[in-house]
Image (tube, helix red, strand yellow):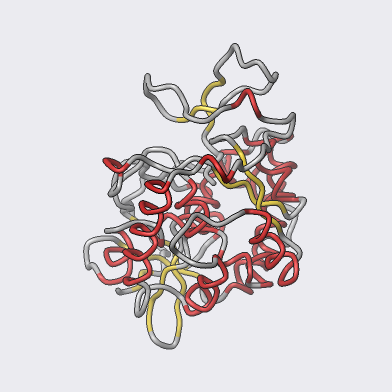
Amino acid sequence: MAALNVDGVAKGVNSGVAPATYGQGDRPPRGDYASARADYTCEQDWDRYTPEDHALYQRLYERQAAQLPGLACEEFIDAVDQLGTPTQIPRFDALSQRLRRATGWEVVAVPGLIPEEAFFALLAARRFPVTGWIRKPEEFDYVVEPDVFHDLFGHVPLLFNPMFADYMQAYGAGGMKASRLQSCEYLARLYWYTVEFGLIATPAGLRAYGAGILSSAGELRHSVTSAQPQRLGFDLERIMRTRYKIDTYQATYFVIDSFEQLFRATAPDFTPIYEAVSQRDEVAAEATLPGDRVLGP
């Protein structure tokens, strides 16, 4: 659930919460925000999904699942079956029961993109927000906003991994502090280059663990095997300085050695790191700097 880079808030919502928007564009956010609670969660309303919705979910699931071997990390492959049968959109309550037993997390429905503070607060409480609606058939290959398929297939399986689950909670807690320090952009970049578009080095070679990659028809193979993008060793301050692409495949991917390394990176107090980063220039998404640890595909 990408709830970062929020540029504005729409007005006139009956419930008192407003849909978040990001980037530039005239199309209003999707989702029934009038049904949302103060924390932006809502009921999944599973019965409203049509047979066509379930069929579309199954097509998306089966296409992505077929690409996983040799491209996705084993932790993800081992856990993706926890989503349940691909023939229908999962019921969040049943999925949450399995997730609580594994790592103490649960999934909660939200109407769509939500503001940073609400997003961070949910993660800190080990509650992962999942968009309730599913894309249209004509958006099969690309959808602008994250939908229920992206959020479930891309994000939820790794929440069954204890180390990654702890990282996500620590990220949420760190995000709440970053919001008070006016440093959310740095956390947004960390989220983008790890949770959404991260790669991991394994004995079998590079593998994807980022949700934006794992739920993408084309970027999964591109990120792992193409010679076109650059791949750099994980460096926290470098990531926080680096801008990213929102409308193309990534020009740069950062590679972790393990989920333990990722969790350790969230352990220190980020306050001095934010200060150090703020004193240095931003880095273009495609740039290579002296000292970068450049890795091959």
> Quadrant of the rendered structure where residue 13 is?
top right
Q: Picture coordinates of residue 66 (x, y %)? A: 32, 72
Name the residue: 72% across, 68% down. Answer: 103
- What quarter of the picture does the C terminus occupy? bottom left
Q: Picture coordinates of residue 59 (x, y %)? A: 33, 58
Q: Can you say whether 248 is above or below 198 in the image?
A: above
Q: Can you say whether 182 is above or below 78 in the image?
A: above
Q: Picture coordinates of residue 42 (x, y %)? A: 67, 37
Name the residue: 68% across, 68% down. Answer: 98
The extreme top residue here reads 12
Q: Work out whether residue 16 or residue 261 is closer to the camera in this orientation and state it.
A: 16
Q: How many marks?
A: 0
Q: Can you say whether 269 is above or below 28 in the image?
A: below
Q: Can you say whether 254 is above or below 175 in the image?
A: below
Name the residue: 42% across, 29% down. Answer: 23
Q: Left or right: 155 with respect to 25?
A: right
Q: Picture coordinates of residue 240 (x, y %)? A: 53, 49
Q: Work out whether residue 167 or residue 100 is closer to the camera in this orientation and state it.
A: 100
